[in-house]
Image (spheres, rainbow, N blue to C red):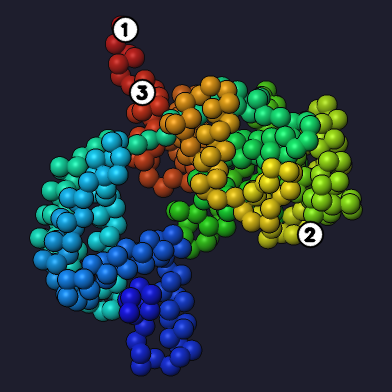
Amino acid sequence: MSELASLAVSPSAPTTTAAALAGFVTAAMAGNTIAAYRSDWDRFERWCQARGTPAIPATPAVLATYLAEAASQPGTSPSRRWRYSPSTLARWVAGIDKAHELAGLPGPGSHPEVRAVLSGIRRTRATPPVRRVPLLLDDIERVVAALATSGWPAALAGWRDRAILVMGWVGAFRRSELVGLMAADVSLHPEDGLYVVLRRSKTDQEAEGTLRALPYARRRPLLCAPCAWVAWTGLLSAWEGYDDGPGGRPGLMRAVRAIASCTSHLCGDTHLVARAEAMARVAPDAPLLRHLSPNGAIGASALSGHAMNLVVKRRAAAVGLPAARLGGHSLRAGFVTQAFRSGASAHAIMRQTGHRDPAVLETYSREGAPLVGNAVTELGL
């Protein structure tokens, strides 16, 4: 039986205690990490069974052979020479070590033989990392300007995608952070703009919670995150009938017309704001960003990170930007790059992005704003 599946809880523990232990061990790791480890462990277990060797405890020689065999498998397309990247193989080792750790055994991944094999694979397979092109301020404004804000059902997707693009860019959110937002996580502050509470993030696995402020856009109204939130959340509220309207498509159509008739900042319209706030009050744990059907229905499930990627690509392609090199991370990367170009300090940027190590930001600075803080500009060329 898979050690990760059973979480290696001692069989001598009482049933209720074993269940509690399993729950706590699982909670110590992110859900995506657990899923990846389990999948990787199942693969290794099948490989060992086919060769008549135990998967646990696994010897360093067995693990080294496993990695070398996988690293030699050719890719599935001309642009992908090898099937498995060094980072994938390293994750496999981490998962196998975790299974041994949970069983109270030393992990074979720390053995010099295994480390040498991984090092050799990295050296022979070295390729530059694939980075998303950042969407800068003018880029994001251009994309948002092309979105439909009236007409049915185009305006429905237009307002949802504006919320994704503007909130994602101004808030410098990771994909998982943005699509994981619930209705109660966002509120409107009269002076600061949107307050967004992140219940959990990549750098906050213990759910201490962090607050991000998305200010009112005075000079670029298209990029006003409060307006985008008021419009989209108001539409959600109208769909559910939380605004005392008919709900469903009739309620949505009426709400779209009301938004289209507003000639100023939507976040200043008390009726529209009340409609948006009703969503958080009545259904606080409802997903904020959701899937849409072509006929104008709003789904109940949260938008996935992959779907968010496709939104960014599709909307960017519509205005002639290189969609193949863009994705959900282009919003976060664009914020950081633009902030560096505008003279913001690493500390100020980290307050919005949630980064804990300024060295990570150096990648954005080096690739997206190579002349900022660079001595070459001081040489009098």
Asked whether residue 227 is in view, the answer is no
Identity of the residue drawn at 22% across and 73% down: 49
Amino acid of disc 1: Gly
Residue in front for this viewpoint, 361 or 367: 367
> Can you give x and y, in whole percent of width and height, for residue 38 in the image?
36, 67
Q: Residue at x 58, y 53 (%)?
A: 180
**Within-10-Å neighbours for mark 1: few <14, some 14–19, many 20+:** few
- Under circle 3, the secondary element is loop
| Left or right, 257 with reference to 59 | right
Q: Quarter-wise, where is residue 378 in the image?
A: top left
Q: Position of residue 95 (x, y in %)?
A: 30, 64
**Marks 3/1: CA–CA distance:** 17 Å
Whole-percent x and y of residue 31? 46, 63
Marks 3 & 2, CB-CB < 8 Å contact: no
The residue lying at 48 percent from left, 89 percent from top is: 16
Q: Between marks 2 and 1, how big is the CA–CA gap? A: 62 Å
The crowding category of the residue bearing disc 3, from other C-alpha atoms within 10 Å (few below 14, some 14 to 19, many at least 20), is some
Disc number placed over residue 380 in the picture, else none: 1
Q: Quadrant of residue 40?
A: bottom left
Amino acid on which disc 2 is placed = Val
Mark 2 residue crowding within 10 angstroms, few (<14) / some (14–19) / many (20+): some
Give the labeled residue for mark 3. Answer: 370
- Residue at figure coordinates x 50%, y 54% from the top left: 201
Q: Earlier in the sequence, mark 3 or mark 1?
A: 3
Looking at the rendered structure, the kind of residue marked 3 is: Pro
> Of tags 2 and 1, which is closer to the observer?
2
| C-alpha gap between disc 3 and disc 2 | 48 Å
Q: How many marks?
A: 3
Looking at the rendered structure, the secondary structure element under dot 2 is helix
Question: Is residue 201 visible to us here?
Answer: yes
Quickly name the residue at label 2.
282
First reached walking from the N terminus: tag 2 or tag 1: 2
